[in-house]
C-alpha cells in the first residue's frame, strides 16, 4: 500500500501568508489545498477529497473564523488557528483553542499540527 500524506487545508485571506504556510507544510511532506475565505473553505470541505486538518487564520473578512472553526469541529477536523491579533490570542487561550501567534516558524506550525492530531479533539488543544 502506498503512503498517502495527510491533506491540510490552509485558510487565510492573505496570499503571502497562505503561500508561506503551504511551503512550510509541503516541506514536511503534507499535501496542501488553500482557501482564501469561509465560502471557499466550505466548498473545499464538500469535495470528495478528505481534509485531515485545517490551518485557519483567526481574523478573516466575511464569515467569522470562530464559526468556521466550529464548522470544522462539527466535521471532526482538527483546527490550528493562526493570528497576530492579541484579542484572538486571548479568546483562543480562554476557550482552549490551538492557536499559533504570527509570525511563527515552520517547526512551531508542525508541532501545533501534531498536537492537533494527537489531542483527539477536533479544534481543541489537549487539556492534559
Image (spheres, grey):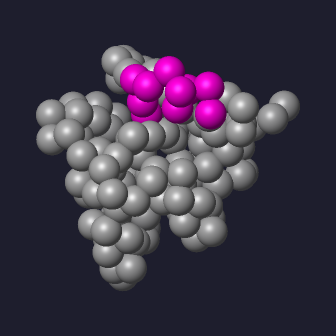
In the image, residue 79 lies in the stretch drawn in magenta: no
* Above or below, 81 relative to 69: above
Residue 83 colored magenta? yes
User: What's the magenta bit mostly, secondary-structure-wise?
Assistant: helix
Depicted 47 relative to depicted 68: above or below: below
Question: Can residue 111 be seen from the camera position used here?
Answer: no
Q: Which residues are magenta?
A: 82-91
Q: Position of residue 59 (x, y in %)?
A: 39, 40
The reply, left or right, for residue 46 in relation to residue 15 is right
Residue 106's place in the image compared with 96, above or below, is above
Residue depicted at 15% across the width and 41% down the height: 15
Q: Position of residue 110 (x, y in %)?
A: 45, 31
* Position above or below: 71 against 88: below
User: Is 23 situated left or right of 6 in this image?
Assistant: left
**Residue at the spot x=31%, y=68% of the render?**
39
Q: Which residue sits at x=23%, y=33%?
A: 17
Can residue 120 be seen here? The reply is: yes
Q: How many marks?
A: 0
**Residue at point 50%, 21% (across, down):** 86
Where does the image place residue 88, in percent across and percent down from the top left? 52, 32
Image coordinates of residue 53 in percent, x first then y, are 48, 53
Name the quadrant of the C terminus: top right
Q: Report the quarter where the N terminus lies.
A: bottom left
Amino acid at each position: 500500500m502506498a503512503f498517502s500524506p495527510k491533506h491540510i487545508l490552509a485558510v487565510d485571506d492573505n496570499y503571502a501568508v497562505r503561500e508561506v504556510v503551504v511551503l512550510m507544510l509541503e516541506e514536511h511532506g503534507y499535501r496542501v489545498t488553500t482557501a482564501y475565505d469561509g465560502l471557499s473553505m466550505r466548498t473545499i470541505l464538500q469535495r470528495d477529497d478528505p481534509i485531515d486538518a485545517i490551518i485557519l487564520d483567526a481574523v478573516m473578512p466575511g464569515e467569522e473564523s470562530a464559526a468556521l472553526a466550529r464548522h470544522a469541529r462539527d466535521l471532526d477536523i482538527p483546527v490550528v488557528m493562526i493570528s497576530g491579533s492579541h484579542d484572538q490570542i486571548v479568546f483562543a487561550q480562554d476557550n482552549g483553542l490551538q492557536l499559533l501567534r504570527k509570525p511563527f516558524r515552520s517547526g512551531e506550525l508542525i508541532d501545533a499540527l501534531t498536537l492537533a492530531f494527537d489531542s483527539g479533539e477536533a479544534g481543541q488543544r489537549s487539556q492534559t
